[in-house]
Amino acid sequence: MAKKRVMIIGGGLAGLAAAMKLAELGIDVDLMSLTPVKRSHSVCAQGGINSVNDQTRQLGDNEWLHFDDTVYGGDFLQHQPPVKEMAYWAPKVIDLMDRLGVTFNRTPEGFLDRRRFGGT
């Protein structure tokens, strides 16, 4: 039986994370990207990424409010079950991306620079 091989289209954070996980499982991976991986839209994005965190939780934030704010901000056009999952998993995904080496702004002490977004 031939060894499994997977082709991933896109060299952004999702594509790279999938490629890393598959490689850890011993699956051969081909990664295709229209732009150089270090210039993907994920790398070039600025302005931050939103999720509930320890600081915002102390101010009364929670995953349900993140979900509600996202749905409201999108004029209720989203398919809401995936948005609910996104709000729940966002803090864990940010921690995973940090462990994978994604470059985030840091405090002078070396911690993730967490702040509230305008309008949230």
Image (cartoon, helix red, strand yellow):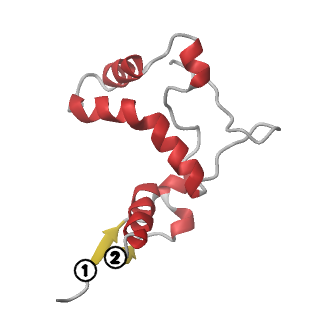
Q: Image quadrant of residue 17?
A: bottom left
Q: Point out the residue furthest to the right here.
A: 108
Residue 111 in picture, x, y percent from top left: 72, 38
Residue type, label 1: Lys
Say which of 7 and 24 sits in front: 24
Q: Earlier in the sequence, mark 1 or mark 2?
A: 1
Question: What residue is shown with label 2?
Answer: 27
Q: Are marks 1 and 2 in contact (CB under 8 Å)?
A: yes
- The tag on residue 17 is none
Q: Is residue 116 visible?
A: no
Left or right, 107 with reference to 37: right
Mark 1 element type: loop
Q: Dot 2, how many residues are within 10 Å of its Cα: few (below 14), some (14-19), or many (20+)? A: some
Please tell me whether residue 102 is drawn above or below residue 56 in the rendered image.
Answer: below
Question: What residue is shown with label 1?
Answer: 4
Residue displayed at 33% across by 68% down: 9
